[in-house]
Image: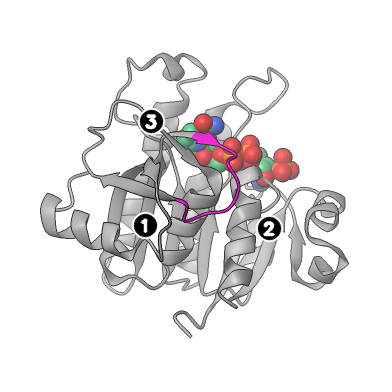
Amino acid sequence: MRYSGTVLVAGATGRTGQWVVKRLKHYGFDYRLFVRSGEKAVEKFGPEVIDRLTLGSIEHGSEIDAALKNADAVICAVGGSVMDPEAPPPSMIDRDGVIRIASRSKRCGIKRFILVSSLSVTKPDHPLNQYGKVLTMKLEGENEVRRLYGENGFGYTILRPGGLVDGGEPLQHEMVFDTGDRIETGTINRSDVAEAAVEALWVPEAHRLTFELIQGKAAPQESFEKYFRLIAENSGKRV
Ligand SMILES: NC(=O)c1ccc[n+]([C@@H]2O[C@H](COP(=O)([O-])OP(=O)(O)OC[C@H]3O[C@@H](n4cnc5c(N)ncnc54)[C@H](OP(=O)(O)O)[C@@H]3O)[C@@H](O)[C@H]2O)c1
């Protein structure tokens, strides 16, 4: 077994979160789900997940604490709905919510925190940032994850994918992994983001790493481990 802990997936009913759950199941890892809607979770994953669910929002600390019980790692694929004027703004979800779940995870002694963020978070003038400064909010969330989980004995991985698409099964494309937020544009299947997030649990080079990822040409892959190794070797882990 490549990873033997229990992984809490925050945002498990989201489009990337669902793939994270599928990949955890694929590798036979133990998992829990932190979701806003139990109905949606059962619709997506079936009644067998009922015992693994905690209902709540990353806006509420006590609900997060309940979800974190017995978890050894967190994969956070939460994202606010930037286009929905009724939804809480990115400052509440992508910054404060992420900071809340990361700091409570650390306080609970959870050793690994894996966050799905976004390409271009370091570019305040990027057109996407006009929506509630979503990129800047994500960067501020990331910064706190790096601070908290950069301490000895803990580890983080922050994934910054390009535009997310739904193209089916993972591991069907070559990957471009980079650091330093230098990739201008690109897309990637949500299933591959999930695969990379799950592999980060066991690949040593993924620990304490912030990296960008987009897909390259179609070509079946065994795993993404070689891409993690390449950026660790080549880049000196730029943020
Ligand atoms: N769209 C893109 O092209 C793109 C590009 C790069 C990065 N990203 C980022 O990648 C991540 C995953 O994207 P996605 O498209 O898979 O997202 P998605 O389908 O919109 O899913 C977002 C998830 O966040 C959950 N969520 C929202 N507010 C929450 C709260 N207050 N408490 C707990 N959970 C909450 C949602 O819950 P419900 O299921 O209950 O709605 C949903 O499960 C996001 O952070 C997104 O910003 C997106």
Measuring 51% from the left and 19% from the top, which residue is drawn there?
Answer: 132
Residue 108: x, y in percent? 52, 70
Report x, y in % for residue 125. 32, 15
As drawn, is 142 to the left or to the right of 116? Answer: left
Label 3 or label 1, whichever lies nearer to me, is 3
Q: Which mark is residue 157?
A: 1
- Please give the count of numbered marks on the rendered protein: 3
Q: Could you tell me what secondary structure mostly forms the magenta stretch? A: loop
Residue 180 image-quadrant placement: top left
Q: Which amino acid does the dot numbered 1 rest on?
A: Thr
Magenta span includes 176:
no
Q: Secondary structure at mark 2?
A: strand
Q: Earlier in the sequence, mark 3 or mark 1?
A: 1
Q: Is residue 170 magenta?
A: yes
- SS type, badge 3: loop
Mark 2 burial class by Cα count in 10 Å: few <14, some 14-19, many 20+: many
What amino acid is labelled 3 in the image? Gly
Q: CA distance from mark 3 to mark 2?
A: 29 Å
Disc 3 versus disc 2: nearer the observer: 3
**Picture layout, residue 139 above or below residue 36:** above
Please name the residue that numbered disc 2 is placed on: 34
Separation of marks 3 and 1 at Cα, in angstroms: 20 Å
Q: Give residue 25's position: percent from left, percent from top.
A: 63, 70
**Mark 3 — residue?**
186
Q: What residue is rendered at 43% in x and 65% in y?
A: 199
Specify start and end residues of the magenta stretch as a single range: 164-172
Cβ of disc 2 within 8 Å of ligand 1? yes
Mark 2 vs mark 1, CA separation in Å: 19 Å
